[in-house]
Amino acid sequence: MDFWNGLLRRIVAEGVEVPEEYYWLRSQGIVLYQGYLFARPGFECLPEPVFPD
């Protein structure tokens, strides 16, 4: 991880589902995460499609 951080690259950990994964990733220097641990998919909040008549 230090190699990528040294290149000024941002690492995003995807699919983080349990706290143990988060803590391990954090211990490795990763600071950007996404997954069920933080937010469930929000399909129910998408607007209804509008179809022309």
Image (spheres, rainbow, N blue to C red):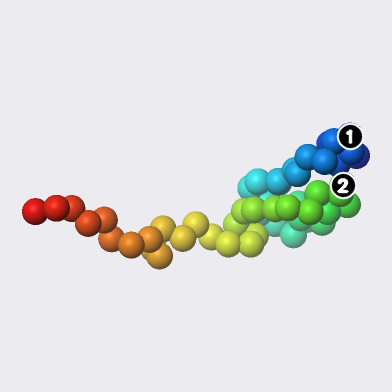
Q: Secondary structure at mark 2?
A: loop
Q: Which mark is residue 38?
A: none
The quarter holding residue 47 reads bottom left
In front: label 2 or label 1: 1
Q: Mark 1 highlights which residue?
A: 3
| Identity of the residue drawn at 64% across and 53% down | 34
Asked where in the image residue 7 lies, by quadrant, the reply is top right
Label 1, secondary structure: give it: helix
**With respect to residue 2, does 36 lie above or below?**
below
Q: Residue furthest left?
A: 53
Mark 2–mark 1 Cα distance, whole angstroms, equals: 12 Å
Q: Residue at x 70, y 46 (%)?
A: 12
Residue closest to the far front:
8
Nearer to me, 9 or 43: 9
Give neighbour class at mark 1: few <14, some 14-19, many 20+ (Cα, 10 Å).
few
Identified by mark 1, the residue type is Phe
* Horizontal side, residue 3 vs residue 33: left or right: right
**Residue at 53%, 60% in the rendered image:** 40
Q: Residue 18's x, y, as percent?
A: 70, 57
Camera-side residue of 52 and 35 = 52
Residue in the image at 28% along x and 60% along y: 48
Q: Amino acid at mark 2?
A: Gln
